[in-house]
Amino acid sequence: MAEDSADRTEEPTARKLQRSREEGQIARSVELTSAAVMIGSVLSFFVLGRFWWQEISEKFAKGFIFDRKTLDTPTLLPHVFSTQIVDAFLLFMPMMLLAIVLAVLASGAIGGYLFSVKSVVPKLSKLSPFAGLKRMLGTHALVELFKAIFKFLLVAIISLILLDKHFSSLMGMGTMSLQPAFELTGALMLEALIWLTFGLVLIALIDAPYQRLSFMKRMRMTKQEIRDEHKDMEGRPEVKAQIRRRQREIATAQMMRKVKDADVIITNPEHFAVALSYDPTADGAPILLAKGGDFVAARIREEAKIHGIEIFEAAPLARALYFTTELDQSIPESLYFSVAQVIAYVFSLANVQPGVDPMVRPSPSIPKSMLFDSSGKQLSSESATS
């Protein structure tokens, strides 16, 4: 176990932290929640303390006064006692509501808010005596023991100091009337709460960072765990192939929507097809909007026929454009003249007038460096064929 802990040198990944949240494992500080509740209690006593003790003294005094009807009818006593209990509950309800709100806010201060069903599902591993012994003798249990001892000593020391300081006043409470006795009790309780709150805040300021660091240390991973997680995130080969296939389908669909904007389709005539667009009013070169081989080339030709786009057969030029130009990129400078011949011919067909002979269909030639076969291998000019 020590070796395994020593191997956990890597910070937890976001996925590891997410899984721990799903299992109900997050950083918590009980001391921070306790300190927040105590602060709320002290604030409540400061604001409503005098009103509370006055009301309590009056209700306490009334609790010992019974009219003749109540004394003669014992069945009325439960109703009287229940009414006094409800009045006392309503009296302290504001403090309880404030304590609940502060407890909820403080509980998520360092680890966030979480409700996980997995954390409340019974686990057989928790019934293991070895696991229980490990928890009892672990570092976490030792820290909790020290905190419990410190809190016990804190309460004991504060109680002894207050008893020594107010011993004569406590001894004289027996001779006081009800209301002054309650006021003295309230003052002593408020003083005790203030000192206890200071102590708990001190503990919380130490415990909250410790719990955060301790949680992150428990979540640390080995290098092998990180590699395994990356492998799982990448997925199995068949899953990756399916994702790539889907991505290609989406990219092809987007490319096909651009074919309608092309001015000419240059083909192989069957194996390759490229769609070019040219704006005569701009200074730029023609842009390759779409390209494809075999099945995709057939689809490009079909789209061209649907939208009435001229299809020009020039095998060497189609292969050169296919293998040297990416989508939405300008054609290479060495192919400017060859493509210009094709575009000029296509534009002349669009502007042909009655009685005027159309432009002669060109046979564009391309540089030797731009000759390719169907596999993308460069060819010499002698071996290039249509």
Image (cartoon, rainbow, N blue to C red):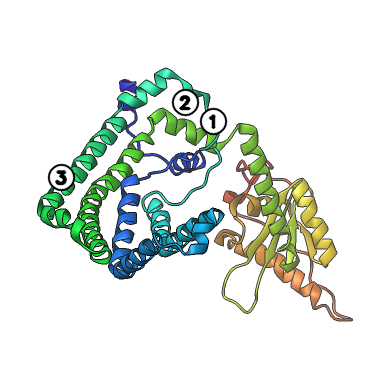
- Badge 3: how crowded within 10 Å, few (<14), some, or many (20+)? few
Say which label, 1 or 3, has the lower sequence index: 1
Is mark 1 in CB contact (under 8 Å) with mark 2?
A: yes
Disc 2 designates what residue?
126
* Camera sees residue 1: yes
Which percent across, then down, holds residue 172? Answer: 15, 57
- Helix, strand or loop for disc 1: loop
Disc 1 designates what residue?
122
Disc 2 marks which amino acid?
Answer: Lys
Q: Measure how far apart labels 1 and 2 are at the Cα level.
A: 8 Å
Task: Decide: is 301 above or below 227.
Answer: below
Disc 3 marks which amino acid?
Answer: Ile
Q: Measure how far apart labels 2 and 3 are at the Cα level.
A: 37 Å
Q: Which mark is residue 268?
A: none
Which percent across, then down, holds residue 11? Answer: 35, 39
| Pick the front one: 384 or 71 | 71
Say which label, 2 or 3, has the lower sequence index: 2
Disc 1 marks which amino acid?
Answer: Pro
Residue at the spot x=72%, y=68% of the render? Answer: 261
Disc 3 designates what residue?
157
- Badge 1: how crowded within 10 Å, few (<14), some, or many (20+)? few
Q: Of all residues shown, which one is farthest toward the top?
A: 130
Q: Is residue 52 left or right of residue 146?
A: right
